């Protein structure tokens, strides 16, 4: 039996809980971009189809899995999966120790109940509306690290990186156990 990879959601989230106003990342934060690249370098990634297409060119050393309802979609790199459970099985079969969910909103919502860890960049910005990140219930998550950064000449918004660990084992994703 193959062990289940750690399921980690990684995202930049506004102070009012949004990841985007509809398409793309709404901030220019080089520090966050480098943080994301450093953490995910060489890793298995789970992305919704639109997020995958917006990130074309990022997958030189990654193993992207594209969450899509279309069984005929053929990505230029990576492979398609139809559920979080399938993504975990494919990643486990490929020897992954961790699977990073990188967006968008539907992928985060589908993965949150089964997530083990959250790596969030909290951006001091209010978007007002857009694509929400799932609610992080403080009774279920423990913040284990935090690193603060003030706004500066290359970052219009202050931000902080935070890691959260789930306090109790997550739910098994629907569609199959490992």
Image (cartoon, rainbow, N blue to C red):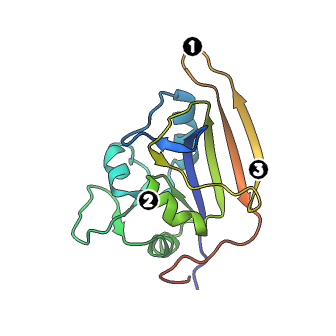
Assign a secondary structure to mark 2.
helix
**Mark 1 vs 2, N-terminal side:** 2
Rendered residue at 33%/57% (across/down) = 49
* 114 lies above or below 135: below
User: Where does residue 36 sit, x and y in percent of width and height?
Assistant: 54, 42
Mark 1 = which residue? 153
Q: Residue furthest top?
A: 153
Q: Residue furthest bottom?
A: 1
Mark 3 = which residue? 143
Question: How many marks overall?
Answer: 3
Local crowd size for mark 1, using a 10 Å CA cut-off: few (<14), some (14–19), many (≥20): few
Rendered residue at 31%/49% (across/down) = 53
Local crowd size for mark 2, using a 10 Å CA cut-off: few (<14), some (14–19), many (≥20): some
User: Where does residue 7 sit, x and y in percent of width and height?
Assistant: 59, 64
Mark 2 = which residue? 106
**Which mark's residue is nearer the viewer, 2 or 3?**
2
Rendered residue at 58%/86% (across/down) = 1
172 left or right of 62? right
The quadrant where residue 72 appears: bottom left
The quadrant where residue 75 appears: bottom left
**Mark 2 vs 3, N-terminal side:** 2
Q: Is residue 45 visible?
A: no
């Amino acid at each position: 039996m193959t062990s289940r990879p750690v399921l980690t959601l990684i995202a930049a989230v506004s102070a009012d809980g949004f990841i985007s106003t509809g398409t793309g990342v709404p901030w220019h934060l080089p520090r966050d971009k480098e943080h994301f690249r450093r953490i995910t370098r060489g890793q298995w990634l789970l992305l919704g189809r639109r997020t995958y297409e917006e990130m074309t060119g990022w997958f030189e050393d990654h193993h992207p899995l594209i969450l899509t309802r279309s069984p005929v979609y053929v990505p230029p790199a990576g492979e398609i999966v139809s559920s979080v459970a399938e993504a975990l099985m494919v990643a486990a079969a490929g020897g992954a120790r961790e699977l990073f969910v990188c967006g968008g909103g539907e992928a985060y919502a589908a993965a949150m109940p089964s997530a083990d860890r959250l790596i969030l960049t909290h951006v001091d910005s209010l978007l007002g509306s857009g694509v929400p990140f799932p609610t992080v219930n403080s009774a279920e998550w423990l913040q284990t690290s935090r690193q603060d950064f003030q706004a500066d000449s290359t970052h219009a918004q202050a931000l902080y990186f935070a890691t959260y660990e789930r306090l109790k084992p997550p739910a098994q994703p629907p569609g199959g156990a490992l």
